[in-house]
Amino acid sequence: MEIDIDAIVAKYRPVVSFRVKRSIGVQTPDWEDIVNEIMINVVEKLKKGEFRGDSSIGTFIYTITSRRIIDFIRKKSKVLKHAPEPDPYVSPQEHIENRERARWIAESIEKLKPKYKEVLYLYYYKELSREEVAKKLKISPRRVSERVNYAQKLLKKIMKE
Amino acid sequence: MKKCKFESWIDEYLLDRLDETQKEAFEEHYFNCLPCFEKMEGRSEMLAVVRAKGSEIFRDESAPAKTRLAWLEPVLAFLSPRQWAVAAVSAALITVLAIGIIPSLKKDIPQFFINDDLVRGSSIILISPVINNLNQIPSEFRWQSLGENTEYRLFIFFEEELLWNTTTKANFVTLPDEIKSQMVSGKKYSWQVKAFSPEGTLIAVSSRVQFNFDVSK
């Protein structure tokens, strides 16, 4: 089977980075090392011919990534004293890596039309369910999703300008 | 372009509303579906900004008066200002009479603002830590319970950015060592608790309390 390893690394590095950051938190300084380790491991396995096409390449890399994350969390919990009770799996967290970009996005959201802004306010900031937002705004739940989608498209457009 | 059936899971995933099996299925999916991944990346960024800077972005939305204006205009146009004045005085008189005669049997749900959040319901009283200059990282965050069937979400902020959040049905959270290891002595942190009904409606919010710690003490 012909495999373009460089193309695979280029395609999957952002996906692996996202998954790692979301699981262990971007504030954990090791996250970049872990991503590098995973990518090296992926390349090694591909070179050794361990990917036989039983699953998709995405699932193959997903499995390697998940194993490494579990391993990291286990080791870290062991090292630290007073390990927390059953739930050592850290809740996902958001961190805005680039403050300038964050400010820019915030300004772009402020510029959106009220009907998009109010959906983002209720759905993302107030964290109401889609149905609750729909009820509050007297629109269908489907329309709520459409507005969030459209708001995202508009933001992308504003930010490209 | 055909819509991917997993697309509707993007927000559910980012808002932590998927169960463990669904979460794993979705994670495996976005390793296999580039359009979903790209969309989720954008969403995640948007959500992070909304969560961290929401109180600035939505200053207007938090003020109820402004959102009412749209439907208020045709109502106001219904009567002339003089007629409105007469109506208002009559209404005031009726209200005074009603309050004097009918004892209030039901308490109204209080509404108030905390950090630009309109809160429907009671506030949450934070118990600890509520003082500054602690001599170690607080290992537990505790607040006054609002009774059974309430889900709380604890937010810990580093300066103005969200550092960590978690949900619980108890009125305290033990800080995982994973998070402790990210916290730095001398830096400014703050925490806040939001309470949700079983239907997921926000029913109460605490104020945001600052804390810092100095391990050299």
Image: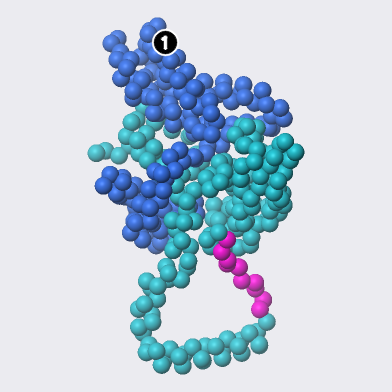
Residue B142 versus residue A2 in the image, above or below: below
Residue A92 versus residue A47 in the image, above or below: below
Q: Is residue B106 magenta?
A: yes
Please name the predominant secondary structure of the magenta segment in the image. loop
Q: Can residue A149 be seen by looking at this rendering?
A: no
Please identify the residue farthest to the top as the structure is shown. A48
Q: Residue at x 43, y 40 (%)?
A: A98
Given residues B211 and B31, the one toward you in this image is B211
Q: Is residue A48 magenta?
A: no
Q: Which chain is cyan?
A: B
Where are the magenta residues, as a range? B104-114
Q: What residue is shown with label 1?
A: A44
Q: Local crowd at mark 1 within 10 Å, few (<14), some, or many (≥20)?
A: few
Residue A22: where, in percent of width, then height? 49, 33
Residue A160: where, in percent of width, then height? 28, 44
Q: Amino acid at mark 1?
A: Glu
Q: Which chain is blue?
A: A
Residue B160: where, in percent of width, then height? 53, 48
- Helix, strand or loop at disc 1? helix
Q: Is residue A31 left or right of residue B179?
A: left
Q: Can residue A8 be seen by looking at this rendering?
A: yes
Residue A55: where, in percent of width, then height? 38, 18
Parent chain of label 1: A
Q: Residue at x 64, y 35 (%)?
A: B180
Residue B105 versus residue A139 in the image, above or below: below
